[in-house]
Image: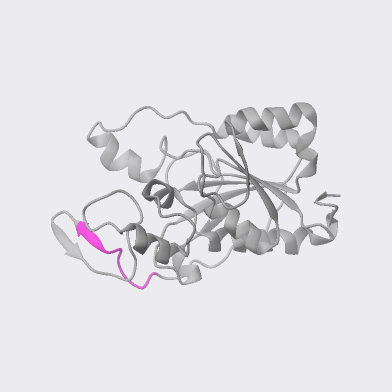
């Protein structure tokens, strides 16, 4: 029996893709930038444009599940804080409403991922590195479309994220896998903390979803829907 096929939109270097693959999916990723380290089948294209192509031509029917991690800079808590207060950065479009409308047109179950902030996404599931024994906190919220699963218990953190805060240095069991300076993690530390070994590019690591998150989600989806899956698509 073929493994179910998953489409990972805005896949970046493949943190989410690796988790879904470990859960039992074959994966095709789509990203607007070239990702030579991406470890699965890859299409370089604008994610919404490619989804339009699949909808128009019916190619979406090959997939069992669609996962999407649209850019988060518009509404991420980190960006809304320091960066906006200092006037840094640039305008970022909010793609979630247009993305959700397309996903709903397919009729396929889907996942939309976002970090904490004000993005217009339901927080059906929230996952944290401590739930999986990782060296990062990295809270991520997931909207589940067309399927559901039980909400896991949020495990108490064991301490602080290591680094400088307002001139004071704090140690702790987690590293800051974002930005640069101020005691932020090195590339090697981020790889270890998130269990990502196929890329050492800082920009890719700082944007990565730890594979443990999507392995959990993928297994939850298959447990809930496994009997309806055949020939690589939802029956």
Q: Is residue 48 above or below residue 116?
A: above
Report x, y in % for residue 66. 67, 45
Question: Which residue sits at x=46%, y=52%?
Answer: 208
Pick out the residue farthest to the left. Answer: 167
Question: Which residue sits at x=38%, y=69%?
Answer: 157
Report x, y in % for residue 73. 41, 38
Magenta segment: does it hold 203?
no
Question: Which residue sits at x=63%, y=57%?
Answer: 20
Report x, y in % for residue 228. 84, 56
Direction from residue 102 to residue 72 in the image, left or right: left
Q: Main secondary structure of the magenta part?
A: loop
Report x, y in % for residue 70. 52, 39
For the residue pair 182 and 161, the one nearer the viewer reads as 182
The tally of labels here is 0
Direction from residue 71 to residue 77 in the image, left or right: left
Which quadrant: the N terminus?
Answer: bottom right
From where the camera sits, is residue 168 visible?
yes
Magenta highlight range: 157-164
């Amino acid at each position: 029996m073929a493994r179910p096929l998953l489409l990972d939109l805005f896949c970046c270097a493949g943190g989410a893709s690796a988790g879904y693959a470990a859960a039992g999916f074959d994966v095709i990723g789509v990203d607007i930038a070239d990702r030579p380290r991406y470890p699965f089948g890859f299409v370089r294209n604008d994610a919404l444009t490619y989804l339009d192509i699949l909808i128009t031509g019916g190619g979406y029917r090959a997939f069992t599940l669609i996962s999407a991690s649209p850019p988060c800079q518009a509404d991420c808590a980190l960006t809304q804080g320091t960066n906006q207060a200092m006037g840094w950065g640039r305008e970022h479009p909010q793609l979630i409403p247009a993305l959700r409308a397309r996903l709903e047109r397919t009729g396929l179950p889907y996942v939309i991922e976002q970090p904490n902030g004000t993005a217009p996404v339901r927080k059906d599931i929230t996952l944290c590195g401590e739930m999986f024994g990782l060296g990062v906190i990295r809270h991520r919220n997931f909207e589940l479309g067309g399927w559901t699963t039980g909400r896991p218990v949020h495990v108490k953190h064991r301490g602080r994220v290591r680094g400088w805060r307002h001139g004071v240095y704090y140690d702790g069991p987690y590293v800051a896998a974002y930005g640069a300076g101020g005691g932020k993690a090195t590339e090697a530390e981020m790889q270890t903390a998130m269990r990502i070994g196929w890329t050492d590019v800082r920009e890719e690591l700082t944007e990565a979803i730890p594979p443990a998150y999507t392995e959990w989600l993928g297994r939850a989806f298959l447990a809930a829907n496994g009997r309806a899956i055949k020939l690589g698509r939802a029956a």
